[in-house]
Amino acid sequence: MKPIVSIIMGSTSDLNVMLEAAKILNEFSIPFEINALSAHRTPEIVMDFAENASKRGIKVIIAGAGGAAHLPGVIAASTILPVIGVPIKSSNSIDGWDSILSILQMPAGIPVATLSLDGAKNAGLLAIQILGTSDEKIQNKMIEYKLELKNKIIKANKELSEIKYEYKTN
Amino acid sequence: MKPIVSIIMGSTSDLNVMLEAAKILNEFSIPFEINALSAHRTPEIVMDFAENASKRGIKVIIAGAGGAAHLPGVIAASTILPVIGVPIKSSNSIDGWDSILSILQMPAGIPVATLSLDGAKNAGLLAIQILGTSDEKIQNKMIEYKLELKNKIIKANKELSEIKYEYKTN
Amino acid sequence: MKPIVSIIMGSTSDLNVMLEAAKILNEFSIPFEINALSAHRTPEIVMDFAENASKRGIKVIIAGAGGAAHLPGVIAASTILPVIGVPIKSSNSIDGWDSILSILQMPAGIPVATLSLDGAKNAGLLAIQILGTSDEKIQNKMIEYKLELKNKIIKANKELSEIKYEYKTN
Amino acid sequence: MKPIVSIIMGSTSDLNVMLEAAKILNEFSIPFEINALSAHRTPEIVMDFAENASKRGIKVIIAGAGGAAHLPGVIAASTILPVIGVPIKSSNSIDGWDSILSILQMPAGIPVATLSLDGAKNAGLLAIQILGTSDEKIQNKMIEYKLELKNKIIKANKELSEIKYEYKTN
Amino acid sequence: MKPIVSIIMGSTSDLNVMLEAAKILNEFSIPFEINALSAHRTPEIVMDFAENASKRGIKVIIAGAGGAAHLPGVIAASTILPVIGVPIKSSNSIDGWDSILSILQMPAGIPVATLSLDGAKNAGLLAIQILGTSDEKIQNKMIEYKLELKNKIIKANKELSEIKYEYKTN
Amino acid sequence: MKPIVSIIMGSTSDLNVMLEAAKILNEFSIPFEINALSAHRTPEIVMDFAENASKRGIKVIIAGAGGAAHLPGVIAASTILPVIGVPIKSSNSIDGWDSILSILQMPAGIPVATLSLDGAKNAGLLAIQILGTSDEKIQNKMIEYKLELKNKIIKANKELSEIKYEYKTN
Amino acid sequence: MKPIVSIIMGSTSDLNVMLEAAKILNEFSIPFEINALSAHRTPEIVMDFAENASKRGIKVIIAGAGGAAHLPGVIAASTILPVIGVPIKSSNSIDGWDSILSILQMPAGIPVATLSLDGAKNAGLLAIQILGTSDEKIQNKMIEYKLELKNKIIKANKELSEIKYEYKTN
Amino acid sequence: MKPIVSIIMGSTSDLNVMLEAAKILNEFSIPFEINALSAHRTPEIVMDFAENASKRGIKVIIAGAGGAAHLPGVIAASTILPVIGVPIKSSNSIDGWDSILSILQMPAGIPVATLSLDGAKNAGLLAIQILGTSDEKIQNKMIEYKLELKNKIIKANKELSEIKYEYKTN
């Protein structure tokens, strides 16, 4: 199957974080591709990638980067696809603030959908929700997924209620 | 025409910022609706809104809020639609940091696509890009839109080149 | 005994922090209950919880959450009881700033009494002080408690005075 | 009527902010007093105030201060009453961060219920909620108050729906 | 004369700030050019610009941008010339922090010489110092320039000494 | 009378802030001098100043600066006198954070006594307290000064008590 | 010998940091005392301490505290002695920002000489410099101390020069 | 060979970070020297160093420091050479913010080319780019260096493409 989501990261050192996006796409049976390409080391490859993604059948791009994280914005500049940005708290990042602000604060005209620090799983889920806007099957899977999340915490809460304290009462 | 994008804000004082989303949707001829509903003052109406948005034909939700900005996250909790969050630097906000972090840092499972502070125009554009993933006409308009952005700055640059300095040379 | 304080947290991973509230309530013989319910995964259960807490005899709610910490505010939206918020420095938090600002910066009309980062013990003590406003017995216990705090540090100070330095003189 | 809530501020320059607490208490017919006393200029008066507040019939203390805002914590040190702290963005404050952190980050044993920057109205409402824990009449007024908040935004939302845009549809 | 310094900014709204670089270059008789080109709106023109700057005789590039300020880094990616970055506190910037971090925190391999917020004058001076490393005439002018700075403050200090206070003594 | 306190600032644009130090020294009849000398524009004059201050009879140095505020630290490096630093929120400062951190975070061995942002009045008072450690007359004046501060707020508080609210009671 | 410097900390958990002040005082043969007293747990003892310090012969007070660090300010309120504040990055502190701002941002009238985070050694040195303003012997020791600091780094620099790199040349 | 780049650091504890600059200079066969001299402990040696660097044949100075990092600015004050500043996250630094702001926010007239936190490698590369402005051989080496960076990530990306996921497709 041809990939419809493209995961891209600025460095292979970001792989551990970005795999969370891959896993959730896998769980939803969404075909995807993974690349590590740097806006600063391979700018023309990144630009080619961005310009051709739509023609290759890609529908959503997930881009993760740390530090002065230009990758998501640089890709958004050269595509009309929705670009999802994942700020990464890499070793060369100042507690993640640089990554967040470099991705979030894009100028008017070139949006990047920014997620939480290291939030690659949510990036995958947002890609799935975007695909779901024109695919009822995906939407139904998402309904199930949210039900599971709910049931998991209800179950955890039940276990919690069995801990005993002298004055605890539920 | 039935709305397919829903713009919602936590307070009518956010209207000036959020109208930028409305304007760009208008420019792309995307039917939309606008509501002001508070996650804290009308929680059950917000929950109803979120639970029923998909059934009413809404495909993307744009939610703006300031301060402890819970509205986008509370809506995302009760819908499977993509939710776009706009942090607003309202009068009760600490330079916008509270709004940004309250929207951005959602837990795994419940993504909110966060845009820049007061970035309602980009929220509208992201909604359009999302709709474009299944609508070629919208994508073509987006290509034109980006071309215009480009031409505008090229023209501005030309005007710049006519300013004269003694040692300025282009 | 029916619980009069309700401790609630956004995830069971917050349990270690929130147990400090339970322990101090136990020490003051205040009956309480503990729940883990998420504003984002189980929104309608949280709303039910908040709407019915007062009718069930609860007098004070202590809510802890990390990251985009909406739980205390979402509960405060649907109850007239005092809600005490505990920002938690969870793994998905940016040094705790997101949790603090998401809880602290509530809009006018819906207060959340916010305590220090991971300050669950103080949340328990504040709940006790609130109950004490209409219960002299609790107030008397609080007087004793503060006396103990005082005596503990006076004793520690005495031990300190026995360390000898050449020019140290007390 | 004897006051049961005491509003105290570090300087009369904080009066404009703190009057919001007075107004909401007035609206709920809660008898209160207002004082301006400084933890740094009149420390022994503040300590006397704190030690005797409970005996004088005060049930809740609301303390506002800016900059290195020690007043709420210093009062909390010498009373067993619940102390509500209002960080104030005064002229000598660094965007309010100093006031917030000086009030919020109290050590274990001495809680201060902290509200949003300049959040004196919410301080008044929290005091009312605390008094409501033992006074059903107050609780009933609070129910009405929240209903009004709700109706106000529902009405504002209705007015919003009458604005016409070409593609706006609700 | 062919330009040897190239000033580039992300938007013509940055012109007022960036003119300070032009003025100081003018003062030192360094031939320069000015362009407004956006890394996000005209990515391929920016890349062309960067790739060809050296061939066109440019020796130093000064790039200013605000918000998610990618321009200096994107240029640095495609040139071997020294790139000087000027973070700009534009209207869409969060007090300048986003601009600073987006420019400063470049990954290893692709340096950007970052100056203070709105520090375009210092950017011009740094460009002059760089040119001075191989041009003694420029270095001599710089020595004079620093002497002037010194004399200006010595003169201001003298004027200060004439203000009289009762107990002031110099 | 020969000056015993030396006020120094990095630029005459800091004069308005630093005059607060001069005024309070005047009020206490402490002879002082004022200079504007820059650590960056007149480094060798600043070093001379610092090395000779003690010999000239100066007992305390008050140094104010904004932005990358090196002046207090550079002076502290070349004197054995106590150096009091005043961070100034000048136009080239990022909300004062740069000034504060540049002065506060001195390495072990070279202390600078840092005061609040724009806190020149307190700098003057600290200088007076330091002189008071060996001069009982100054200490007695300081006792009076603190009494005045106290009486001023007691008087302001009295005026406050005359404002009438329906339910206000003191 | 009677102590002339008093070291005080908010909790014995701050002892490790504050001992650096004790060590340097010892090195300079300055008699001192150490106490652990909390502004929040033993307010009246702290006030007594502050009011009587001068009468007991104390000349300088060094106060260290973490989190909402009120101790230095509360002491400064009740003494006319110079108070040196040491912000401590304790376990309940938000990266030290709370401690720094709670100590630094004192209101006009009540200065606290603030040092760097965990900067107890510099606090001791500042106390020594203050005592030196009226004691030439101490000043002479300080001159020697600074010479040692200088010689230590000159020696370290010499060792550095012996490391060999291919193109390293000194 | 006589050194043309001078690496200087505030303390030998910064050596590990600063060696990255040395290594890259070595790789480009640029002769350099390394010194550890403190702006605060050896101010007059630092000033001598800065004043004479140009005469000794130095063309670029790289200065690294942590905390209140005055070294780069103090050197820039006394030389007309380009000064590159490396903020260091030393043990006495507040997450690096103090080092960054102390170096970055230099006043108009005295630029310091600031690099990322601990970015000594990029400091070396910037020095090389500066030397390259008048040395084609160096520029050619830099072209090769950037090609290597590019090939390294292209190779890493190829390896990435061999990882298999069920729905991964490239």
Image (cartoon, coloured by chain):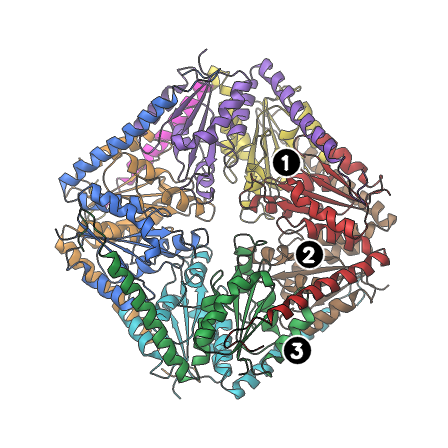
Chain colours: A blue, B orange, C purple, D yellow, E cyan, F brown, G red, H green
| Foreground of the two, B98 or B31 | B98
Q: CA distance from mark 3 to mark 2?
A: 28 Å
On the picture, is A42 further left or further right than G157? left
Would residue G27 be visible to someone looking at this image?
yes
The secondary structure type at the circle numbered 1 is helix
The magenta region covers D139-164
Residue G97: x, y in percent? 56, 46
Label 2 resides on the chain identified as: F
Three-letter amino acid code at the position of disc 1? Leu
Q: What residue sits 85% from the left and 45% below the top? A: F140
Three-letter amino acid code at the position of disc 3? Asn
Q: Are marks 2 and 1 on the same chain?
A: no
The secondary structure type at the circle numbered 3 is helix
Would residue H37 be visible to someone looking at this image?
no
Q: Nearer the viewer, mark 2 or mark 1?
A: 2
Q: CA distance from mark 2 to mark 1?
A: 27 Å
**Residue E151 numbered mark, or none:** 3
> Which residue has dot 1 on it?
D71
The secondary structure type at the circle numbered 2 is loop
